[in-house]
Image: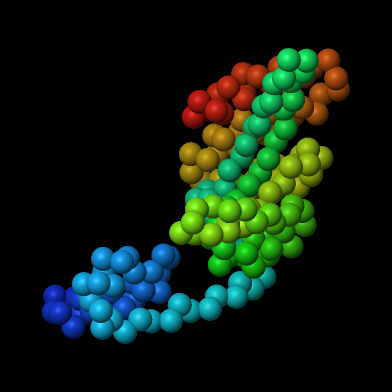
Amino acid sequence: MLEAKEHSSLEGVIKIIGIKSAINLGLSESLINSFPGIERIARPIFAPGEIVDPNWLVGFVDGDGCFHIVTQKTESSSKVWLAFQITQHSRDTLLMESIVKYLGCGKVYNRNSTPALGEAPDFRVYNLDTVSSKIIPFFLEHKLQSVKSLDFYLFREACVLLLIPPGGGKRWSPYAVRARKGR
């Protein structure tokens, strides 16, 4: 379209708006009112296959993954746990399930996101043994390329400290504080 300069005509703009109708949230009320005769394009159905390249998953996590160090303090105790999570739009539930299959761990949870987005699937791994035996080795072998590698470093350090037998549990707090404050 750009090479043929179609985008600079009214017909080209209408064609672009038709394409936009199939992307993310579709057309805004304003666009629908401004261009009432738009021929909408059907959203392609994407059925993810098997994940075959670990680098694809690393890139996906670089963009949409989270390494959480969760702290909870009550009057009588403190708890710390780790959570690895990826959240997507509801239309990507099958993709989240393929990540469970590929990594051999985790679970997909559905939660309400926003009224516009509806339910959003979360792929999550909470179990400390699973984090230490599957998630951490995967990302040590297949390196994250973004600033998220710093989050992973803190996450890994917290995991090591949490695996120390009772009595060594107080050492985690600097890592949790740094992770919560944006490194």
User: Which residue occupies 69% across, 56% down?
Assistant: 108
Looking at the image, which residue is at 57% across and 48% down? 65
Image coordinates for residue 27, horizontal then vertical, percent: 34, 69
Percent from the top left, x then y, of residue 56?
57, 60
Q: Position of residue 13 (x, y in %)?
A: 20, 76
Rendered position, 60 above or below 170: below
Colour mode of the rendering: rainbow
Specify whether residue 65 is in view: yes
Residue 71, image quadrant: top right
- Quarter of the picture holding the N terminus: bottom left
Where's residue 138, x and y in %? 69, 48
Asked if one can make out residue 1 in the rendered structure from this viewpoint, the answer is no
Residue 166, quarter of the rendered image:
top right
- 51 left or right, relative to 42: right
- Residue 4 or residue 93, whichever sits in front: 93
Q: Is residue 176 above or below residue 15?
A: above
Along the viewing direction, whichever of 71 and 152 lies nearer the viewer: 71
| Residue that extends furthest to the right in the rendered view of this protein | 165
Residue positioned 66% across, 31% down in the render: 70
Numbered circles on residues, count: 0
Seen at 23% across and 76% down, the residue is 35
Above or below, comparing residue 40 to residue 114 in the picture: below
